[in-house]
Image (cartoon, rainbow, N blue to C red):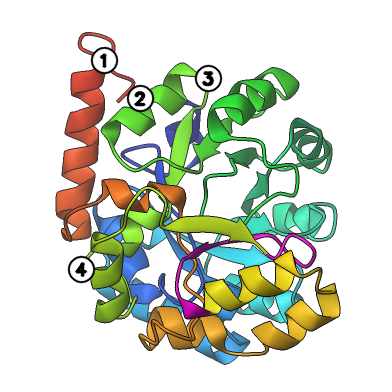
Amino acid sequence: MNNITSLLPLKYPIIQAGMVWVSGGKLAAASASAGILGVIGAGSMKPDLLEHHILKAKSLTLHPERLAVNVPLLYEKTKEQLEVSLKLGIRIFITSAGSPKIHTSWLKNEGCKVIHVVATPEFAMKSEAAGCDAVIAEGFEAGGHNGRDEITTMALIPQVVDAVKIPVIGAGGIGDGRGIAAALCLGAQGVQMGTRFVLTKESSAHEDFKNALLQAKPESTHLVMKKLVPVRLFKNKFYDEVSRLENSGATPERLAALLGHGRARAGMLEGDLEKGELEIGQITSLIKDLPTVEELVEKLVEEQRRCLPGGAFF
């Protein structure tokens, strides 16, 4: 057991990331059953929908203790999301996109474990000072919203490890057992993987979105909307329009107007590959299969062990 499997009731120190529109109760339950942390992404859910997915996840796994909820702190319903999760027995929370000072003490007093996502060593130290149990050091390669400093995962993990005493979980651009081994060698105690779990049978991503990702090339994603909230997108017509506006010097307000509401849902959940916002990580071009979560976890563990013969971390 390492620090993460001591801190959390996991068989393997792997976290299936909580992502908008693609990581609901089915994916989280399959992950928990496979021995890793199954995370429901609350960023796209109102409290009643979150309740539905938590109950669904609990009904589909014998290991509800391995279920967690990811709550971005920038939304107005954050407190209600946390209250619903607590009421339903969730005791592991991953927070992001906001100050860890806001809710960590309250959650800790409720007997919870709190992990905060950071993009710089400075934010890691603030998370430690706020009482977080661990941090997820997420590099520039990650899908969805990213840190403005654009620090890559390989550069970020060792700096965060040196900056804090609490366990560090590596994330961003980790797509197979080789990536896991690399993160662990850099000092991380575990990893969080998002894009790799989008491409599983249990993810709620639309089949057209999954099929498009299976055809991805190394240059198929790019970080845009840096004036608004930086986000890594799969290139499509919506991406082209964003890039055109950015290159013409568009204001944040103009970019926000283009984004509007519901684009991520339209693209990732409903399969609008033209006008939808398709958030995905840079590692997507490495992935060429669509396994079940159980098959994937078994493969990841075996790959990691082959990378470190005689010295595997798990």
First along the sequence among labels 1 and 2: 2
> What is the quadrant of residue 226 in the picture?
bottom right
User: Most prominent secondary structure in the magenta stretch?
Assistant: loop
* Highlighted magenta segment, given as a residue range: 225-237
* Percent position of residue 123, x then y: 79, 40
Q: Is residue 106 above or below residue 49?
A: above
> Label 4: which residue?
201
Residue 116 visible, this orientation:
yes
Pick the residue in front: 258 or 56. Answer: 258
Q: Which mark is residue 181?
A: 2
Q: Is residue 116 magenta?
A: no
Residue type at numbered disc 3: Gly
> For the residue carrying disc 2, how many other residues have a C-alpha within 10 Å: few (<14), some (14-19), or many (20+)?
many
> Label 1: which residue?
308
Residue at (51% x, 88% y) in the render:
49
* Percent position of residue 173, x then y: 45, 42
Residue at (76% x, 54% y) in the render:
104
